Every structure is written in C-alpha cells, then in structure tokens.
Amino acid sequence: MSKKSIILVTGGSGLVGRAIQEIVLLEKRTDETWIFLSSKDVDLCDYDSTKKVFEKYQPTHVIHLAAMVGGLFHNMSHNLDFLRNNLKINDNVLQISFETKVQKVVSCLSTCIFPDKTEYPIDETMVHNGPPHPSNFGYSYAKRLIDIQNKAYNQQHGCMFTSVIPCNVFGPHDNYNLESSHVIPGLIRKLHDTIQKGGTTFNVMGTGKPLRQFIYSLDLAKLFLWVLREYKEIEPIILSVDEQSEVSIKELANEIAKAFDFTGDIVFDTTKADGQYKKTASNAKLRKYLPDFEFTQFSVAIKHSVDWYRQNYKTARN
Ligand code: NAP
Ligand code: GFB
C-alpha cells in the first residue's frame, strides 16, 4: 500500500466492522488513516449521498462490508428486500470507488451464496455453478453479482476490485435482534433471557442437525487486513475455518450452554426450518497463502462472545 493510505470501511459499525476497528486499534500503524462508516453517516442505497462521502474522505482503499444482513429466518421472509437493498448498496460503492479512483476495494460475499446442489467441499471456483439455496436467493444473487461487477470493472478499467467469502461469523457487537439475527447471537440472547427469568429450558430452532463453519470476528478481521494489504487477485478468496472445524447446531447449542454454565434442558423445535443442511467450504487457497494462520479455539471464542453479551446486553443491538 502507498505511503499514506486512507481506508474507508463501509458497514464499520457492524459485527465485522467493529472487529476490524479493534484490530486496527491494537496495530496503531501510522501510515494508515481509517474511517468507519455506519448508516447514520450515509445511506449507501443513495448514489448522491454516497458520492458526497467519498468526495469528503477521498479514500485510497475501501473495505466494503455494508449490507442488509440477516439469519435464515429473516432471509426467508425478506428475499426481495435483501436483493434490492444489496444491489443498490453494492452498485453505488463500486461505481463511486471507480469514479473517485480508489486504488483497491475488498468486498464481502458469503459461503451461504454457493449453489445448493453441489459437491463438497465448496471452493472459490464454484460460486456461479447453479442456483443458491431457496431460503436466501435474494441475498445470494446480490452478493454473487459483486464478483461479476469486480471482473467487469477490472476488465474495462483495470480496477483492483476483489472480494472475500467468509463462512458464518460471530463475536462481540453482533446483531441480537431475534427477528433478524444469525444463530449464534440469537441463541446467546435467548439463553441469557431464559436464565434471567429463572427458566430451565433452552429452546433451539430446527433439528440441530445442520452443519456450519463459524469464524470468530477478530480472526476474520486479521485476515481482512491481510487481504487489503497483500492479496493481489481479482478472484475471491474464502476466509473460513478448516473443514474439520465444522460443527452441528446441536454441538453449538451445547457449547453456548457450557459458556453460560447452564445445566437445564436443551429442546429442539423441529417445526422450525433448518435451512441449508451444510455449506462446507475449503480454505485451501487461504492456507496456501497463510499456512500458519491460527484460528481462535471455538470454545474460547464462544466463551468470549457470551461474556461480552452478558456485560453489554443493555446496549447491544437487540
Ligand atoms: P451487520 O453486523 O449487520 O452490519 C451491517 C453494516 O452495514 C452496519 O454497519 C450497517 O450500519 C451497515 N449498513 C446496512 N445497510 C446500510 C445502508 N443502507 N447504508 C449504510 N450502511 C448500511 O453485518 P456483518 O455481520 O458485520 O456483515 C458484514 C459483511 O460481512 C456483510 O457484507 C455480510 O454480507 C458479510 N458476511 C457476514 C456473515 C455473518 O455471519 N455475519 C457471513 C458472511 C458474510 P448500521 O450499524 O448503522 O445499521
Ligand atoms: O445463522 P443462521 O440463521 O443462518 O443459522 P444460516 C440457521 C440455523 O440455525 C438453522 C438454526 O438450522 C436454524 O434452524 N437455529 C436454531 C437458529 N436456533 C436459531 C435461532 O435462534 N436463530 C437462528 N437464526 N437460527 C445464513 C444465510 O444461513 O447464513 C444468510 O441465510 C447469511 O444469507 C448467513 O449468509 C451467514 O447459516 O442457515
């Protein structure tokens, strides 16, 4: 990166954005100025106000995290909103990055956008090989288009626009709203509320059978900084824990109960959807670049996340 970089982070107030803030603070690099945006600073669905923000900060680099993001149930009930909002946000950020000569943009896809019918493990070459799972087709197509847009800007204008593909992310500063949250913040919030009310039953939705890879947000943040500074490909790169680290929702629920020292009953409501059974991703490409990267142990990361919520639930995004 050039001598003095100005890095603009869209979605800077969210789960991943706050983790990047924490890592950047720890690093204290003098050659980089960081700006973290939230929707209070600008509605990225709006071209004109987005252009004004870019003209104000004149970023040399952009980490593009901002998106309408949600768990399985929120996606199932709002596919059109996920599609339209994310298409608008992504088109504005990429077009305005091009217009204002941003040197590099790193955007965010997700392992849940891969084809529903596929071989495993999935890898970066398989993004467009078939329709996504029906539960989140809106979000998935909007995200897949980022990869297409990156290639078009690079082919026509030589732009260094690339993307990363994280698996499911969790950690402090997550979204704990029960309508829209992902499974880990949803279960942390629910068990916390149950314990506060003196309850002895921990209700988990679905069968508990689906499998997921979960990456701790602070680990993802470190990988994001490496991609920003060192990764030179336009092709996306999966940022996921190893395949062997995949856990079932049932194992996850047990881990969360353990972190709360909860010894009551864990009950599975099988009337609720399971969503994708699995989306096992290969991190072989990442491992080729960073063979020694160490992920935080899952039980330790879950404990940190639970403890953070217990200390901050009054001000957390509920
Ligand atoms: P998050 O916690 O929901 O944060 C979303 C961020 O986007 C917030 O800062 C939010 O601002 C901002 N935002 C949303 N709509 C906006 C708009 N119209 N204008 C301006 N800002 C807007 O999401 P996250 O979990 O950090 O996700 C970050 C990125 O990682 C997303 O691109 C997501 O698709 C991707 N990802 C997430 C996961 C996961 O499991 N969480 C997995 C794979 C990929 P406010 O705070 O003001 O609302
Ligand atoms: O994180 P999650 O909502 O989304 O996980 P996905 C859903 C799985 O957790 C399903 C079970 O098997 C649910 O039955 N589950 C159990 C719960 N209890 C709960 C709960 O209280 N809340 C939630 N949300 N789930 C998403 C995609 O898929 O992955 C998004 O839909 C996004 O687009 C995200 O990309 C990363 O992992 O199934």
Image (cartoon, rainbow, N blue to C red):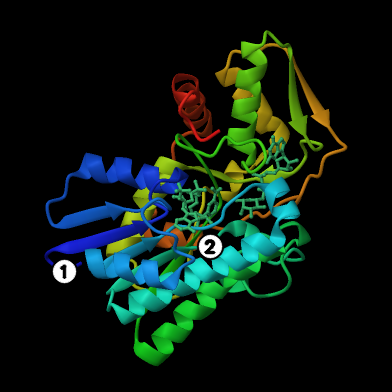
- The CA span between labels 1 and 2 is 26 Å
* Circle 2: residue type: Leu
Q: What kind of residue is marked 1?
A: Ser
Q: Earlier in the sequence, mark 1 or mark 2?
A: 1
Residue 60, by quadrant, is bottom left
Q: Are marks 1 and 2 in contact (CB under 8 Å)?
A: no
Answer left or right for 158 relative to 316: left
Is residue 147 found left or right of 162 in the rendered image?
A: right
In the displayed structure, 88 sits above or below 260; it is below
Picture coordinates of residue 94 (x, y %)? 42, 74
Determine which residue is flagged by label 1.
2
Badge 1: how crowded within 10 Å, few (<14), some, or many (20+)? few
* Callout 1 secondary element: loop
- Residue at image position (23%, 63%) is 57
- Determine whether 153 is above or below 272 in the image: below
Taking depth in this image into account, of 171 and 277 the one nearest to the observer is: 171
Where residue 301 sits in the image (x, y, percent)?
48, 32
Q: Secondary structure at mark 2?
A: loop
Residue 209 in the figure: left or right of residue 233: right
